[in-house]
Image (spheres, helix red, strand yellow):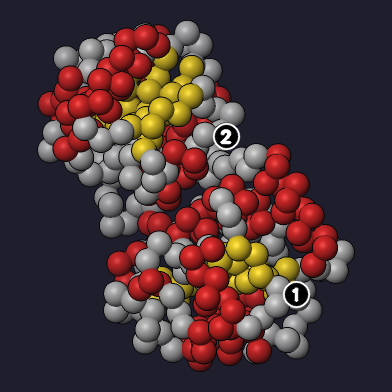
Amino acid sequence: PDGNDSGTFNSSSKILFIRLNRIGDALVSTPLIHYIKEKINSRIYVLADLKNYFALENNPDIEKVLIFRKGITGFREFFDFIKSEKIDTIIDLHDDVSATVSFLIALSRVRNKFGLEKTNKKLYTKTVPKPDPINIHIIYRILELSRLFNLEPEDAEICIRYFPKPQAMEKADKFISENFTKGSAVLGINLSAGSDARFWGIKRYKELINSLFSYKIEILILAAPKDKDKVELIGYPKYFLSESFDEFAAVISKLKVIFTPDTAAIHLAAASGVPVFGLYVHDTADKIWSPAGVDFDYVETQGHNLNNLDFEKVLLKFIPFLEKHIK
């Protein structure tokens, strides 16, 4: 079936986006959510999960973020929510087929079920062709879904949207003012990532810090509390252990440049307009996951971890990048 005429969407429409899994997946969905909110002014809801809901919950474009819980209870809560809120449209934001999401779509009693054209396309009332996943940036791929609302994705802003809570911003401001010279350029060196495979090593981080003392910058080490032992082994006195994702984002927004192996940090930097230098393992090194809307460069390792990523190779690329932004 063709479903609803997308030209009839308006401020009384109730649209539910489904985006489970990783933090980065949630963040790269925000340009589409914002574009639809801006153009249609509908009421927008998101089904997320425990691993990524916090990347969306303070977003002013979103009415409510529902956390999906595994098992029968989670399915029941989802269907009860659709019924109580009178959701009329569900959008599957996933690039690939998800068995869980397919079940949710198939069993949902809503007028419109939208998604990218995939092997489960019969579950949707309308689909749009899925752009080439090798050459097209993930944000542009997701924005193609706006065509189902008679919108033109070329007109959309591609900026990631993330909004730290006021308390987190206040803590970040206080930390920066107490530890750094007013008006100074602060380089953030983030140690933590989703897996230990993306830790570059104590010795290399020490060498990196030592190589930067002649530049007009101040340095801040960023890390998750679980990596406090690594911070202590590096021995640099200015560091911030983020107790929450919100605090992490707030501090990143205060930086001049960030050096990071973590893709979530890359997208948070993009949301705040902070230039990014990334360390990528081969699995994530394609430009389709690069930060949108900010200056960016990276070094890639051909392996599945950063163990063999040469220090001199990184420095050769990073120093010109840094110099460009601290003139």
> Residue at the location (75% across, 83% down)?
215
Determine whether the residue tagged by mark 2 lies in a helix, strand or loop.
loop
Q: Residue type at mark 2? A: Asn
Check if mark 1's residue and mark 2's residue have beta carbons within 8 Å.
no
User: Is residue 140 in sight in this rendering?
Assistant: no
> Who is closer to the viewer here, 70 or 177?
70
Question: What distance separates the C-alpha of mark 1 from that of mark 2?
Answer: 30 Å
Image coordinates of residue 9 in percent, x first then y, are 42, 12
> Who is closer to the viewer here, 245 or 215?
245
User: Is residue 10 in sight in this rendering?
Assistant: yes
Query: Residue 210, relative to residue 282: is it above or below?
Result: below
> Residue at the location (31% across, 14% down)?
80
Query: Residue 8, relative to residue 131: is it above or below?
Result: above
Q: Residue type at mark 1? A: Glu
In the picture, the disc for residue 58 is: 2
In-image side of 286 versus 256 (left or right) = left
> Residue at the location (38% across, 35% down)?
48
> Who is closer to the viewer here, 284 or 202?
202
Image coordinates of residue 202 in percent, x first then y, are 51, 84
Image coordinates of residue 110 in percent, x first then y, are 27, 13
Is tag 1's residue or tag 2's residue first in the polypeptide sequence? 2
> Residue at the location (38% across, 32% down)?
67
Q: What residue is disc 1 on?
A: 218
Task: Tell me the quarter of the picture where residue 47 sits.
Answer: top left
Determine whether the residue tagged by mark 1 lies in a helix, strand or loop.
strand
Task: Tell me the quarter of the picture where residue 194 sits.
Answer: bottom left
Quadrant of the drawing holding the C terminus:
bottom right
In-image side of 278 versus 218 (left or right) = left
